Structures are given as C-alpha cells and as structure tokens.
Image (cartoon, rainbow, N blue to C red):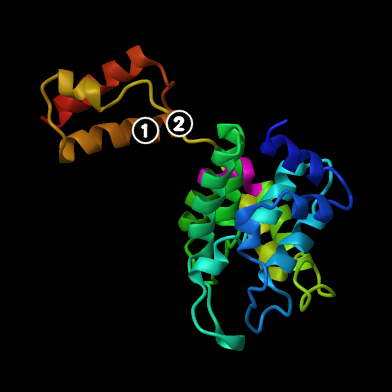
C-alpha cells in the first residue's frame, strides 16, 4: 500500500490525527510550532488538523485539502507576534501540496484538485470588485466552487478565535447570490459563422469585420435570424455589399 492510499484511508477515520502523525508527512511537520497572528490563537499545524476534522469523513480528498490548505505558511511567514504575515501562502502552498502529492503516488487528477482548492481557498471579493471579475473567476472555478465553499466553512471552524461565529459570513452569502445571478444568465450563442469566413472572402480584421459579425450576432440573439450557417452567410454577403 503506497503512502497516498495510507493518507486517504487515515482521513476516512473520525480520529485520523494519530495515524497522520505516524505517517510523518514532511509538509505538515514543517507547520508544527508555527505561531500565527492576531487572527488565530492556534499554530498552523493545529489549525490544519482542526480544519480537516470539520470536513466530512466520506470525502477524504476534501479533508486532505483542509489538511494542506495552509502548508505555504511556514515559508511565507514574515515578522513575529500578532502582526506577522503570510502573503501569498495560498500560491506557495498549492505548489507544495501538488509536488508532495505527486511524489507519494497520488493520481494526477487528485493532485490538481487539491492544489486548486489550496490555491483558491482565500477567495475574497471587495464591494468594489466588478461583476465581470467575479464572473470570470467563477467560470474558471465552477467545478470546485461548492467544495471551496465547504473548505472556507471548515477553515473558519478550525480557527479558535472564530469557532463560535457563523461558518457562513454575510460576504459569503453575498457571493452566493452573485453566483446565482451568473448561473441564471443565458449561455452565450456560438455563431454558425466566424471571422474565418470573412477572411476566406479576402476581408481583414477591422471595423467592417466587427460590424458585420456584431450585427449578425445581435440579430441571432434577438431571434431575428436563425443560427443557421447558410442563412448567416447569405446575410453576411448582403451586409458586406451594403457597407462596401
């Protein structure tokens, strides 16, 4: 049984900490005794254990995300005491988790999954963040969003200062509402024609190029034309003649 299997088997247990300790995972050992700032009163190692325990035992890979989500803190720690910082620990941690998992025999897709959740576990958007920025982030992370939400809740549960506060904050609720709006948006129409058709007609990208494609897109979106290649090519020829 390789180490990857042993780790996942351990995380299926309610009391996994003694087994994980015995496995001597170096990226966790590095977190032992690492004090945090005013936002925590537990060490990084203690926080990782508590976070993993707050996630469901029947999701061992998600628990592993909790166990590894702050492994970038030891190498990014700057300063001491309550004002120390861990800037970009999620970026460093994603790489650390990925490289370790590869080295002990985890499947590539599992390594990708864990490293992505570690990378994005600090997701946070300000009041001034543009809707399109959130939309782009969500589209890139839609497949892991629900698990990121669970990880964020567990992250709060594993914080001894926040343990008695709600796991879902008002900002998290606001984000959820924005995501619902994004989900309700119609899927963008992929035209049956493209700029390649104009290029084959010896037209080059430019104002006329954009005008023709933009006009046809709007007419399809408004259901004035079907998204049919032959119909659109005919209309394209008419528009080109009108604007020649």
31 sits left or right of 6 in the view: left
Residue lying at 60% horizontally and 87% vertically, measured from the top left: 81
Q: CA distance from mark 2 to mark 1?
A: 8 Å
Task: Point out the residue furthest to the right here.
Answer: 14
* Position in image of residue 175 (x %, y %): 64, 60
In depth, the one of 159 and 126 nearer the eye is: 159
- Name the N-terminal-most of marks 2 and 1: 2
Name the residue carrying label 2: 189
Q: Does the magenta portion include 142?
A: yes
Say which mark, if any, is on residue 115. Answer: none
Residue lying at 60% horizontally and 39% vertically, measured from the top left: 104
Label pair 2/1, CB-CB below 8 angstroms: yes
Where residue 193 sits, quadrant-wise, is top left
* Position in image of residue 51 (x %, y %): 75, 60
Residue lying at 83% horizontally and 41% vertically, measured from the top left: 58
In depth, the one of 89 and 23 nearer the eye is: 23
> What residue range appears in magenta?
140-145
190 sits left or right of 75 in the view: left
Q: Does the magenta portion include 131?
A: no
Say which mark, if any, is on residue 217. Answer: 1
In depth, the one of 7 and 109 nearer the eye is: 7
């Amino acid at each position: 049984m390789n180490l990857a299997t042993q780790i996942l088997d351990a995380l299926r247990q309610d009391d996994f900490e003694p087994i994980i300790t015995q496995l001597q995972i170096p990226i966790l050992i590095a977190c032992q005794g690492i004090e945090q700032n005013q936002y925590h009163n537990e060490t990084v190692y203690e926080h990782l254990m508590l976070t993993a325990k707050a996630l469901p035992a029947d999701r061992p890979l998600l628990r592993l995300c909790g166990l590894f989500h702050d492994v970038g803190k030891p190498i990014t720690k700057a300063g001491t005491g309550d004002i120390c910082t861990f800037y970009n620990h999620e970026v460093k941690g994603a790489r650390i988790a990925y490289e370790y998992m590869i080295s002990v025999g985890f499947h590539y897709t599992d390594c990708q999954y864990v490293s992505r959740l570690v990378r994005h576990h600090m997701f946070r958007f300000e009041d001034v963040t543009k809707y399109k920025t959130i939309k782009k982030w969500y589209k890139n992370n839609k497949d892991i969003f629900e698990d990121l939400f669970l990880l964020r809740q567990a992250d709060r549960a594993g914080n001894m200062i926040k343990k008695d506060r709600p796991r879902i904050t008002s900002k998290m609720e606001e984000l959820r509402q924005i995501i619902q709006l994004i989900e309700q948006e119609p899927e963008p129409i992929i035209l049956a024609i493209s700029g390649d058709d104009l290029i084959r007609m010896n037209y080059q990208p430019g104002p006329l190029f954009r005008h023709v494609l933009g006009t046809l897109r709007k007419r399809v979106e408004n259901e004035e034309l079907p998204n049919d290649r032959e119909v659109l090519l005919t209309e394209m020829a008419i528009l080109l003649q009108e604007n020649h």
